[in-house]
Amino acid sequence: MENTYQDGENYVCADCGHEWPMKEPKKADDDAAAVIKDANGLVLADGDSVVLIKDLKVKGSSITLKMGTKVKSIRLTGGDHEVDCKMDAGNFMLKACYLRKV
C-alpha cells in the first residue's frame, strides 16, 4: 500500500495498523532437526541395519521387495522417502514406516 512506513525493524500500515518484519525470519534447518523413526518408533541413523516389515512392490517394475529382507548400512535423506539403501535387487529409496531397526 502507499501508506506504509518503516518503524525500526518493521513495516507499518497506517490504514489498518498491521505490522510485519522487514526481513524474513531465519528458518531452522529442517533436515538437522528432523528425527526419522522406524515402524516401532526407534530413531534411525546413518549406517544402521534394518529389516522390511511388509512386501513392497517397486513401482514401474515387476520386482517385489520381500518382507524380512535385511538391509545393511542405510543412509538417511530428506523428503518423502527418507531412507536410501542398496540391496541385491538395486538401489532404493524407502519410507521409514516400512522398516524395523535390527
Image (cartoon, grey):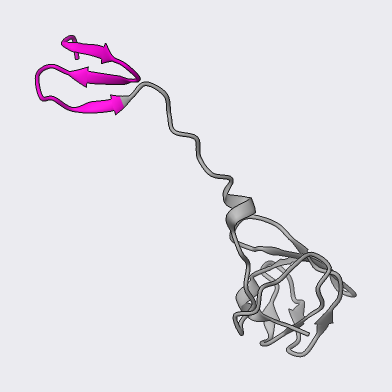
Q: Which residues are magenta?
A: 1-20
39 on left or right of 100:
left
Picture coordinates of residue 75, whole percent (x, y)? 78, 62
Picture coordinates of residue 26, whole percent (x, y)? 50, 35
Seen in the picture, residue 8 relative to 44 is either above or below; the reply is above
13 on left or right of 86:
left
**x 28%, y 27%: residue:** 20
* Membership of 33 in magenta stretch: no
Q: Quadrant of the N terminus?
A: top left
Picture coordinates of residue 62, whole percent (x, y)? 75, 76
| Frontmost residue, 99 versus 32 | 32
Instruction: Return the residue found at the far front.
Output: 8
| Frontmost residue, 40 versus 92 | 40
**x 59%, y 60%: residue:** 80
Among the 4 quarters of the image, the one containing residue 83: bottom right
Among the 4 quarters of the image, the one containing residue 7: top left
* Membership of 18 in magenta stretch: yes
Seen in the picture, residue 19 relative to 29 is either above or below; the reply is above
Q: Quadrant of the C terminus?
A: bottom right
Seen in the picture, residue 9 relative to 69 is either above or below; the reply is above
| Frontmost residue, 66 versus 82 | 82
